[in-house]
């Protein structure tokens, strides 16, 4: 017992080193919030199509398919940074990206896609922002992975502009795909 | 006087955005409820601010939702549940006591208990130690102590 007590300070120091080491990790974001929706059914949505003449954007129509739902806005600078990567990302990952223009005038969002290209398999306009709130987004861009059963499997609350984030998304997809 | 008034107006203009020029509920009682509730909801972007204090887009949105639901006759708890379902317990400044938050609530008590045990053990040991040490004196040391105590001369050493 005495001898074990002698080890106690060493153990405490080791535990503190582990905690501080984790704190020093440059990839760790102390403000990151885990999504409350992981493992739960994605909030159902039924939004007007963004592109004129396009059908409404409904979650139900993607049943049986793995999709990446990407919230964006024309007024959001990080979205502009992320946008050029999305098309290649969709091809590389083999997952269709669904774009939802969050709290954006449809006209402005259409202009954004006309200027920078449209990487999305389908788009919808969430002008009121309530679909975004249903998903618990803290801002744009955010990307949610929704499996064929409509369950949210993964969320990235950041523009996917680095290989590290792309790898994270790819790893999440690999886990979901049979 | 006129200058003072202009100054006051300018100060008011600076403060006005923070006070919120957003649509308010017409019933002051309901508006007060909305304000009280928004003080206990955390802004998920700024994190250490409540949505009542924050000027972030999302905070404004959440204030709007709170007003809307109060106007629709929802209870405060309904609104809390609505936000927790979307953002998790983190949005509440006063998180509920449940399995996921045991560490949060009980952690400080556990640290206090460990410290308390340490203090008790320390004082107990200290209370026992002088006796233990006295018993360890050799016969020679013992007689030297007695000599010192009796006539203050130290014959030895």
Image (cartoon, coloured by chain):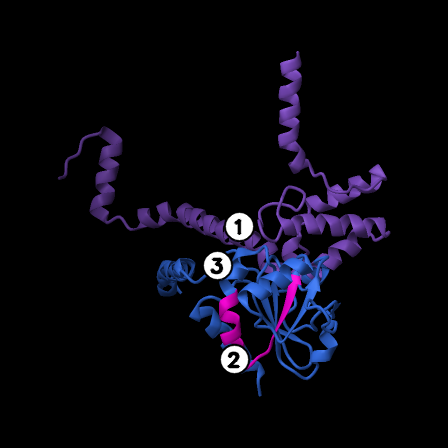
Q: Quadrant of the N terminus of chain B?
A: top right
Q: Is residue B98 visible in this depiction of the protein? A: no
Q: Is residue A98 magenta?
A: yes
Q: Residue B139 — which label?
A: none
Judging from the image, mark 2 belongs to the subunit labelled A
Chain coloured blue here: A
Q: Say which residue label 3 marks.
A: A29
Residue A10 in the image: x percent, y percent? 35, 61
Determine whether the residue tagged by mark 3 lies in a helix, strand or loop.
loop
Determine whether the residue tagged by mark 2 lies in a helix, strand or loop.
helix
**Bounds of the magenta segment:** A83-101
Tell me: residue A123, above or below residue A106.
Answer: below
Residue A167 in the image: x percent, y percent? 46, 74
Q: Residue B112 — which label?
A: 1
Q: Say which residue label 2 marks.
A: A91
Judging from the image, mark 3 belongs to the subunit labelled A
Q: Is residue B91 magenta?
A: no
Instruction: Please tell me which residue is depicted at 83% across the width and 37% down the height of the picture.
Output: B28
**Most extreme residue toward the bottom, as rendered?**
A178
- Please tell me the colour of chain B: purple
B151 or A96: nearer the eye?
A96
């Amino acid at each position: 017992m005495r001898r074990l007590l002698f080890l106690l300070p060493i153990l405490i120091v080791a535990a503190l080193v582990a905690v501080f080491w984790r704190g020093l990790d440059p990839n760790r974001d102390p403000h990151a919030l885990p999504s409350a929706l992981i493992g739960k059914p994605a909030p159902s949505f039924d939004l007007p199509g963004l592109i004129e003449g396009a059908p409404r954007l409904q979650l139900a129509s993607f049943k049986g398919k793995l999709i990446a739902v990407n919230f964006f806005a024309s007024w959001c600078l990080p979205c502009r940074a992320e946008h050029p990567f999305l098309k290649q990302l969709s091809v590389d990952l083999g997952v269709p990206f669904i774009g939802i223009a969050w709290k954006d005038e449809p006209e402005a969002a259409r202009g954004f896609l006309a200027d920078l290209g449209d990487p999305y398999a389908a788009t919808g306009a969430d002008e009121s922002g309530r679909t975004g709130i249903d998903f618990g987004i803290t801002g744009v861009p955010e990307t949610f992975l929704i499996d064929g059963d409509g369950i949210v499997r993964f969320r990235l609350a950041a523009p996917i502009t680095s290989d590290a984030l792309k790898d994270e998304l790819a790893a999440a997809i690999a886990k979901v795909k049979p | 006087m006129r200058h003072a008034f202009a100054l006051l107006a300018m100060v008011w203009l600076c403060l006005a955005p923070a006070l919120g020029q957003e649509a308010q509920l017409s019933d002051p009682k309901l508006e007060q409820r909305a304000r009280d509730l928004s003080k206990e909801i955390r802004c998920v972007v700024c994190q250490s601010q409540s949505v009542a204090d924050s000027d972030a887009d999302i905070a404004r949105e959440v204030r709007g939702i709170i007003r809307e639901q109060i106007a629709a006759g929802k209870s405060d708890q309904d609104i809390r549940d609505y936000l927790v379902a979307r953002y998790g317990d983190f949005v509440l400044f006063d998180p509920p006591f449940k399995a996921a938050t045991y560490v949060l609530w009980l952690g400080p008590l556990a640290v206090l208990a460990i410290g308390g045990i340490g203090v008790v053990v320390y004082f107990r040991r200290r209370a026992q130690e002088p006796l233990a040490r006295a018993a360890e004196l050799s016969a020679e040391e013992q007689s030297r102590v007695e000599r010192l105590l009796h006539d203050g001369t130290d014959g030895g050493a």
